[in-house]
Image (tube, helix red, strand yellow):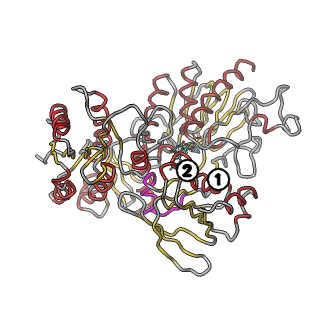
Amino acid sequence: MPDAPVLLVVDDDPRGRNVIERELRKRYGADYTVFCAGSADDPLRLLAGLRDDRRPVSMVLVGERMAGTAGTELLARVGEVDRTAKRLLLTDGGYGPPSESILQAIALGHIDAYVARPVTVPDERFHLAVTELLEEWARSHRPRFEVVRVVGEEWSARSHEIRDLMDRNSVPFGFYPAGSEEGKALLQRAGAGAALPVIILFDGRVLVNPANAEIAEALGLKTRPGAGLYDVAVIGAGPAGLAAAVYGASEGLSTVLLEPEAIGGQAGTSSHIRNYLGFPMGVSGEDLAVRAYTQAWNFGAEYVYGSPATGLRVLGRERVVTVAGGSEVRSRAVVIATGVSYRRLGIPSLDALTGAGVFYGAATSEAQAMKDREVFVVGGANSAGQAAVHLARHAARVTMLVRGHSLADGMSDYLITEITSTPNIAVRHNVVVTGGGGTGRLESLALRDRESGVTETVPAAAVFVLIGAEPRTQWLPDGIARDQWGFVITGSDLLADGYHPGGWPLDRPPMFLESSLPGVFAAGDVRRGSVKRVASAVGEGSIAIRLVYDYLHDS
Ligand SMILES: Cc1cc2nc3c(=O)[nH]c(=O)nc-3n(C[C@H](O)[C@H](O)[C@H](O)COP(=O)(O)OP(=O)(O)OC[C@H]3O[C@@H](n4cnc5c(N)ncnc54)[C@H](O)[C@@H]3O)c2cc1C
């Protein structure tokens, strides 16, 4: 029987510590061991000892005020000793906003959450914070029943893709490298041939090098749309598509939602969304996506998984979406919510720190937490310039890393003026990021000068990557107008000098969010002019349904 995982309480106030210890033992004593310490007991050494003994630590709870150090600082150092333990700061309550040090600690990933010390016993708010963090920890650290076992080459792209898809779709799975003893045994038992990866399902079924749709089908998901006519087909299950599915189904429209990869889209890849309304401590993209998906499901939306939309055509009053693999979705209206792919740096050591000092596009919400810090912005277009100006109001220094030799190539003149007149913004041209890393959070970046070829390592608290995004619209027909970058043009943007777009067959102008093809709407990041945020994608997804409703009513 393995040792129970540890909950470690570090607090200098013996009375407060006793209350927390009692509460934890009472509620979690059957499954966890509770250890307590004061700062004089050298909690970091205690933690290192547990690590060396291979004793899992699920959570470290630290009092806000400790002798000689702030709780936030101690928790930052906890993260250096044990990167997997959840870190909960116990505040002394009060109704005011959290202190600046707490805000910084959250943004830099030094704490996972903060909660007021228990005042009444039992204090359910305290327990809710503890339980939520334990649930997150258990998801990746508790042994669980493996619905799927994947045997593959450890570093192959497809193995990575399958692991990623399983993870983002919340399918409990185990991965076994083909060269490992367990991997070899599984392959032999399954009688599988040489083609990898091999998937072994809980009931013994074996899939050799399967496509996503085959895996989905084997797991009991629907992979083909129904033959009947839907009211609305939603293409893409990111935040915009999920919102459209929830509102479509809840308004009584027969709704089908098509997704080739994983629910949640880009948001599903974010470990910590901090600016979505109603989640003060943030929410993982996966969690948000699973909740939205369940909500859509409960209202009766149909989810078709595994294959991308490959085309769209008009057949009388119907809009027909073709799907890879040969099937078709017949629908009266369509919402395109296929989003964008943010260009990544493609540096694994940095991608592993997304949300812990490495941020893709989400500069505004993190800016305040960058107070007095050294931060970097990668990119040379307007979005990067705006981020730099905004960050410079808080950070000690902002360094823009620009690939080209001039900002003028991609940035508006007014922004260049603003940047050059802001004393704490430096612009480095002809520079690319080649690496970087840190323990639990970003600490340094490796930069290469493209002209001299010289590489240097610089200390960095955060890097904001704004190197563009590509809309996923290649599958759309020419009849759906897009701008020069491929974003779908909608509503009044389609009107040239007040005139309807060419080929527009109706007397009325296109509605807000409606594309140049009547009855086909676009929502979220895929739409020209959209705000690239989860909340705005959700807002557009729900508004699109209102417009679909009007369209169906009038046509
Ligand atoms: C790492 C990261 C972190 C972020 N953090 C934040 C944050 O903290 N706060 C915030 O507000 N915003 C954040 N964003 C931005 C936010 O995630 C996006 O603005 C939001 O997800 C856009 O939603 P969407 O539904 O329009 O598109 P997407 O999220 O891009 O979803 C589009 C979906 O369509 C599917 N799709 C694509 N092509 C097809 C096809 N041919 N057929 C069918 N389906 C298709 C895709 O698989 C995907 O699931 C972050 C983005 C990234 C990349």
Quickly name the residue at label 1.
386
Q: Which residues are magenta?
A: 344-356
Residue at the image position 73 percent from the left and 31 percent from the top: 512
Report the amino acid beneath label 1. Answer: Gln
| Relative height, residue 167 to residue 334 (above, below) | below
User: In this rendering, does residue 316 appear at all?
Assistant: yes
Residue in the foreground of this view, choosing between 246 and 50? 50
Q: Callout 2: 10 Å neighbours few (<14), some, many (20+)?
A: many
- Describe the element under mark 1 as helix, strand or loop: helix
User: In this rendering, does residue 191 appear at all?
Assistant: no
Indicate the position of residue 241 as horizontal and vertical percent values: 57, 35
Q: Disc 2, ligand 1: is the CB inside 8 Å?
A: no
- Describe the element under mark 2 as helix, strand or loop: loop
Between discs 2 and 1, the one toward the N terminus: 2
The reply to whether discs 2 and 1 touch (Cβ–Cβ < 8 Å) is yes
| Relative height, residue 384 to residue 245 (above, below) | below
Tag of residue 363 = 2
In the image, taking residue 445 as reference, residue 189 lies left or right, namely: left
Residue at the image position 20 percent from the left and 53 percent from the top: 43
